[in-house]
Amino acid sequence: MELLNKLNTYLNLIRFYNPIGFWLLLWPGMWGLFMSENFEIKHFAIVLVGAFLTRSLGCAINDYFDMEFDGSVQRTKDRPLVTGIVKPSEALILFFFLIFLSGLLLNWMNWPSSAFINLLNKFLGICLEFFHPILPPFTFILSFFENDFTSLNPFSLVLTNGDKL
């Protein structure tokens, strides 16, 4: 029973029970898939899991960086890191585990000959996910560019079309 309680706290940390962010990530990816002539069900699964992992790791790292601030906000005061149910080290381990799973997911993509550019783009996306909670007080530039790097739309086109973009 304790294992299920711990699993439930991790699901709360990644906002599993509040899926609006997942849907916001999923729709651009689905749009890219449905624009393709080479749609396959495995592509749908990759985009679906990718959207879930991206949303989850973003929530984990955001809560890690905002845990002190979240305690003073009515809407966020009951999050697992604020209440101490999840330790900060556990949130970081979960974040890096989700990044690892995201990297494994990339192995099933149909990379074109310019795979280096796509991997660089994904690396920049992960950096943006990591630094997003830190930078807004200092700059607005991050919010201006983040959709170019974290949207799944270009990846879903690469996934289905490979070299024929």
Image (cartoon, rainbow, N blue to C red):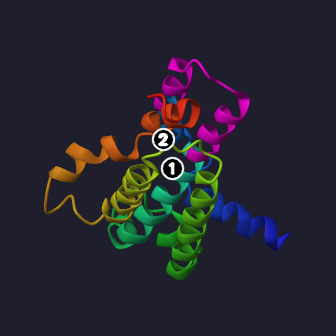
Q: In this rendering, is residue 84 above or below 48?
A: below
Instruction: Using residue 105 as the reference point, say whether residue 4 is left or right of it.
Output: right
**Which residue is at the far right?**
1
Q: Residue at x 63, y 54 (%)?
A: 107
* Residue 155 image offset from top left, x and y in percent: 48, 39
Query: What span is in magenta?
Result: 28-50
* Residue 54 image offset from top left, x and y in percent: 51, 51
Q: Amino acid at mark 1?
A: Arg
SS for callout 1: helix
Q: Residue at x 49, y 35 (%)?
A: 163
Q: Nearer the viewer, residue 113 or 27?
A: 113
Residue neighbourhood size for the residue with mark 2, other residues' Cα within 10 Å, grouped as few (<14), some (14–19), many (≥20): some
Q: Can residue 26 be seen here? A: no
| Disc sitting over residue 125 in the figure | none
* Residue 106 image offset from top left, x and y in percent: 58, 52
Image quarter for residue 49?
top right
Q: Is residue 33 magenta?
A: yes
Q: Is residue 3 magenta?
A: no
| Disc sitting over residue 21 in the figure | 2
Quadrant occupied by the N terminus: bottom right
Asked whether the residues under the numbered discs 2 and 1 touch, taking CB atoms below 8 Å apart as contact, a structural biologist would say yes
Q: Amino acid at mark 2?
A: Gly
SS for callout 2: helix
| Disc sitting over residue 55 in the figure | 1
> How much space separates mark 2 and mark 1, taking CA atoms?
6 Å
* Residue 64 image offset from top left, x and y in percent: 43, 70
